[in-house]
Amino acid sequence: MRPLTHARPKSIVPLLNIPFLAYQLALLKRHGVHRAVLSCSHMVDEVRGAMGDGSRFGVELAYAVEETPLGTAGGVRNAADLVRGRVVVLNGDILTDADITAMLRFHAERGARASIYLTPVEDPGPYGLVDVAEDGRVRRFIEKPSAEDQTVNTINAGIYVLDAALLERIPPARVVSIEREFFPALVTDGVPFFGWISTAYWLDIGNPEKYRQAQLDLLAGRVATDVMPDSPGASRRWIAEDVDLGARVAVTAPVVIGAGSRLEEDCRVGSLTVLGPGCQIGPAASVTGAVLWERVSVGAGAVLRDCVVGAGARIGAHAQVGPGVVLEDGAVVPSGARLAR
């Protein structure tokens, strides 16, 4: 996600001006999970500042902080003292509307001690594959599969249901991989371990392109979520009440415009645009299909299209920022400049 994550951890980057983790907490809450532990090792203060104690999101939050990063299993083990019974684990970078209630039912019906959410993909080459038997029992994990190994197309989708007692199998205070160590050991040892396959919406927001795609999918209603900006939804124009709209401003839905923003005369904010709080769009400027974080200033006559712009960036008059461009926080684009990917 760099350069967007130089000053902000990936787990709280804004999606429609709402921290990403809020979408995961809303998913858990929808399926009856009201207490969550955030396993953190990177920019913990920033995460605490954005998420607090969880009350704003209708859940109770606790924090398990790693002094040094412990890996995908080590981080879960570090939180073991804060959980008990049956535990739902989510990777901190997936946007999904998976039916966790159905997954929990699947887990119980099979007498599983561990279950993993699997999703089919068209091109399994970039992923680690998970092979399951007809009854769903996990048979093997295939990391970095060759063409010959691509006999299945189901990948680890980053949600797990685990008996908390299994976490004792993870050595404490050291780096451990859940995909390469913990899960394969469960298979080897014959622990009841099953794969739940779902075709629900699923997206890994691990790079700027996928991050922007997540915004487009939310705007288009492709993701079932209880988290959306506060304002009218029928028109799909989420415009904060205090936005200052100048004369002859054109705004095309779907669009999100954050609080305290100012759109000056004759500017155009096209569809599939997200403006963070405090943005300023200058006279006759055009912004379409772009994601702007908070306090971005766009000069007169500038054109931004299908790009992502970090907080506090300044785009000069008549500059052009084209598709695929990603600008870090505080970037300055001179007047008349043309940026293309």
Image: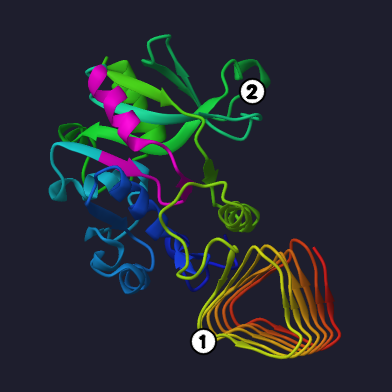
Amino acid carrying mark 2 in the image: Ser
User: Measuring 64% from the left and 23% from the top, which residue is drawn there?
Assistant: 146
> Is mark 1 in CB contact (under 8 Å) with mark 2?
no
| Location of residue 186 by image quarter | top left
275 is higher (above) or lower (below) than 125: below
Measured as percent of width and height from the top left, residue 221 is found at: 56, 51
User: Split into 4 quadrants, where in the image is the C terminus?
Assistant: bottom right
Looking at the rendered structure, the number of numbered marks drawn on it comes to 2
Q: Is residue 267 visible?
A: yes
SS at badge 2: loop
Give the magenta range: 88-109
Observer able to see residue 191: no
Instruction: Identify the residue under disc 1.
Output: 242
Q: Quadrant of residue 43?
A: bottom left
In the drawing, what numbered circle is on residue 146?
Answer: 2
First-in-chain label (1 vs 2): 2
**Relative to 320, is 66 above or below?**
above
Position of residue 262 relative to residue 114, above or below, is: below
The span from disc 1 to disc 2 (Cα, nearest Å) is 55 Å
Residue positioned 54% across, 77% down in the render: 258
x then y, percent, for residue 145: 59, 25
